[in-house]
Image: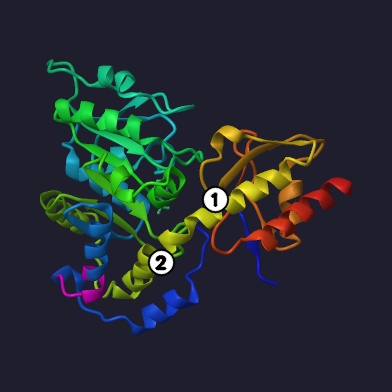
Amino acid sequence: MKKRDFRSDTVTHPTPEMLQAAVNAQFGDDVYGDDPTVNHLEAVAARMLGKEAAIFVPSGTFGNQLCILTHTLRGDEIILGRQCHIVVHEAGAASVIAGVQFNFFDDSRDYPDYKAIEPLIRFDDIHFPRTGLICVENARSNGKVVDLTTLRGIKAMAEKKAIPVHMDGARIFNAAAALKCDVKEIADCADSVMFCLSKGLCAPIGSMVVGTQAFIDKARKNRKIMGGAMRQAGIIAAPGLVAIEKMTQRLTEDHENAAYLAERLEVFESIAVIDEFRDINMVFCTIEGDFEAFELVDFLAGKDILINPPEAGIWRFVTHYWVGKPQIDALVDGIREFFSE
Ligand SMILES: *Cc1c(COP(=O)(O)O)cnc(C)c1O
């Protein structure tokens, strides 16, 4: 039986159409700029996000770190949310690669307005690091989406101070689906944007970075330094094209399925869905009861249903292309069975 995997949208396998595209792809050496499939993917990404240029990178972490390296100087300080992926989930890469330090704004609940971020910018003093970059995240890893007004406020303030803004848009198309806007409107709130092809968009590998032509030219050199310049990358760019052209159009379905899952979980007296974190394809909840987390995880794994253990007491279930209503029903039935035993 096929596994029903709710751990993340990173677990998505390529679709049959993606595999076919990989088989039929044309190749060249991308370090020479010769891979037509990569060139096409970069052109489509830049156009869709409304930027001058794009570059294909191996992972989302790579893309974020490439942007930090390209925007900043060693010893700079960058301003970002305390809970964001770059701070919590990238293994300290910004200190290793770009050699920058962090200054945090509080993103534990709603995203702050620019007025809370502006005072974090350093002025010129012999003691202070230089503020080199502001990073924002949308959609956020906690399942929330930041509205356009907040993002535009941050961008306008940063522009006045001549500080670039990078957006970790790993799930920017989920954000666009949730805000019911064109993804360009979100991307317009940042100088550089990274987004993942390999999450809800189902591509097996790869992320994109978009920005001005000058920024992408500089990033291309830095990608080489970081060891991320690939050769016949058309083999993975071809599925990436299907991801960006087709899979971006169906994310609302994942969001609706997450709402369906939340609705079904709310029926359990012991489960409390956290409504605040329900903007995209994720359901966060607490589960009360006299059991150890691993017992539920193992019980469901025995039924070919995969979930992650809770983080700080909060469980997260993620919907995607491969887990629709029947798989959600199986998960809910599995949880019910666990509690009745
Ligand atoms: C997944 C993710 C990334 C990058 O992930 P990789 O696993 O390195 O591809 C970056 N930011 C956010 C918010 C993410 O969710």
Magenta region includes residue 277: no
Could you tell whether 334 is left or right of 115 in the image?
A: right
Query: Residue 114's spot in the image, x, y percent?
Result: 30, 24
> Mark 1 — residue?
255
Name the quadrant containing residue 45. Answer: bottom left
Which residue is pictured at 41% across the width and 35% down the height?
A: 146
**In what element is the residue under mark 1?**
helix
Magenta region includes residue 35: yes
Q: Residue furthest right?
A: 341
Range of residues picked out in magenta: 33-39
Which residue is pictured at 65% across the width and 62% down the height?
A: 4
Quadrant in which the N terminus is drawn: bottom right
**In what element is the residue under mark 2?**
loop
Marks counted in the figure total 2
Query: Residue 227's spot in the image, x, y percent?
Result: 25, 59
Q: Residue furthest bottom?
A: 24
Could you tell whether 140 is left or right of 326 in the image?
A: left
Is residue 179 in view? yes
Mark 2 burial class by Cα count in 10 Å: few <14, some 14-19, many 20+ = few
Could you tell whether 15 is left or right of 337 in the image?
A: left
Q: What residue type is labelled 2?
A: Lys
Is residue 227 in view? no
Q: What residue type is labelled 1?
A: His
> Mark 2 — residue?
246
